[in-house]
Amino acid sequence: MQKMIFAFIASAAIVMLLAPLFIPMLRRLKFGQVERVEGPHAHSAKEGTPTMGGLMFVIGITAAAMLFSVYDIALSFSVPAILMMLGFGLVGFLDDFIKVKCKRNLGLRAYQKIIAQLLLSFVVAYYAYRSEFIGPVLYDPIFGEINMGWGYIPFIMFVVIAIVNSANLTDGLDGLLGGVTLVYSIAMGILFLYFALVLNKSLAGSPVFVAQSDGMLSMAVFSFAVAGGCLGFLRSNSYPAKVFMGDTGSMALGGAMSAMVIYSRSPFLFLLMGICIVASAVSDVLQVGSYKLRHGTRIFKMAPLHHHFELLGYPETKIVTGYMIVTAITCLAALALYI
């Protein structure tokens, strides 16, 4: 438990210490946000705000998770989780870099993004499938164990790509994705701690499961490091934001959440715990589908869903608070299914 708390504090502290260095540096490099032309008109005032600030919490999370993980088992748990975060963060970084250098709101081409995501998600899914600590068996608190066999690889590829892109869509208001990920990561940290305690109690003496228990503790540390990084970043990213995380940060957080989902072996639980992130993707799909199939008819004033609420007149701070509250409630409901 102490390591989880220390990882949280260390990650948050590193990000807050980096902010006074990174934000002026991003301004000097002219790494400013380029707002979408089709986005809410009120967002035009945010044009030029430093972006790519996600680099700060990527550094903080990596340092804290490596420092406080269970060392002898970290290579099988927290290290792959960190690499997932870094891999998808790199795709986001390239996307951001092209945007700020070319001064346009489109970075990597769609086909370039999907190829990169497919390659990364395949590596992740294949590693998880072959891992003695994960494997093709999923667990659902209602239906129990589900052996996916070879179907595990394409399924996890879909899950990872869906989470990463949904996180990217959710990053549309000051503090929104950071706030939601903060709540989600704390809940996942508690869940991993519970898994570790249950494994220690019921399977003591078995070398594989003792390692699994230590691994769950490492994932708990990683989850709290992610939460701490988000908290530290909110110091500069809450309304009015002094810096944006950019695709660098949103895709990195998507990768981090994907790692938590894979190691918990409970991808279906994300539909409940990450309901606000899922809503961003679903609302976007529904909006595009309705527009194309119903001759220009829109379901929402604007998608993703948080922009719909924004155009209804709700201030950004209320939308962000509402999303965090809903996430807290759904995460508690999910924990109640296990604990």
Image (cartoon, rainbow, N blue to C red):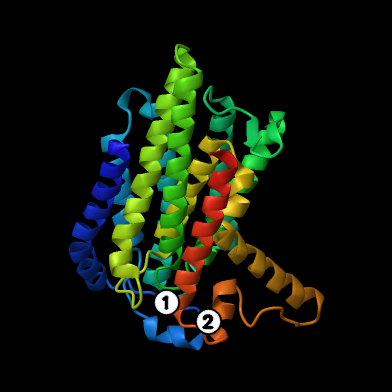
Q: Quadrant of the N terminus?
A: top left
- Which residue position holds label 1? 317
Rendered image: mark on residue 310: 2
Place of residue 331 in the rendered image (x, y in percent of width and height, measured from the top left): 52, 52
Tell me the crowding category of disc 2: few under 14, some 14 to 19, or many 20 or more residues within 10 angstroms, Cα based: some
Q: Quadrant of residue 80?
A: top left
Q: Quadrant of residue 165?
A: bottom right
Judging depth in this view, the residue of 249 and 311 nearest the camera is 311
Inspect this view and state whether residue 185 appears. Answer: yes
Between circles 2 and 1, the one closer to the viewer is 1
Judging depth in this view, the residue of 291 and 116 nearest the camera is 291
Inspect this view and state whether residue 172 appears. Answer: no
Q: Say which label, 2 or 1, has the lower sequence index.
A: 2
Place of residue 84 in the rendered image (x, y in percent of width and height, measured from the top left): 45, 43
- Residue drawn at 26 percent across, 68 percent down: 26
Q: Amino acid at mark 2?
A: Glu
Place of residue 308 in the rendered image (x, y in percent of width and height, measured from the top left): 59, 79
Place of residue 82 in the rendered image (x, y in percent of width and height, measured from the top left): 39, 41
Judging depth in this view, the residue of 193 and 307 nearest the camera is 193
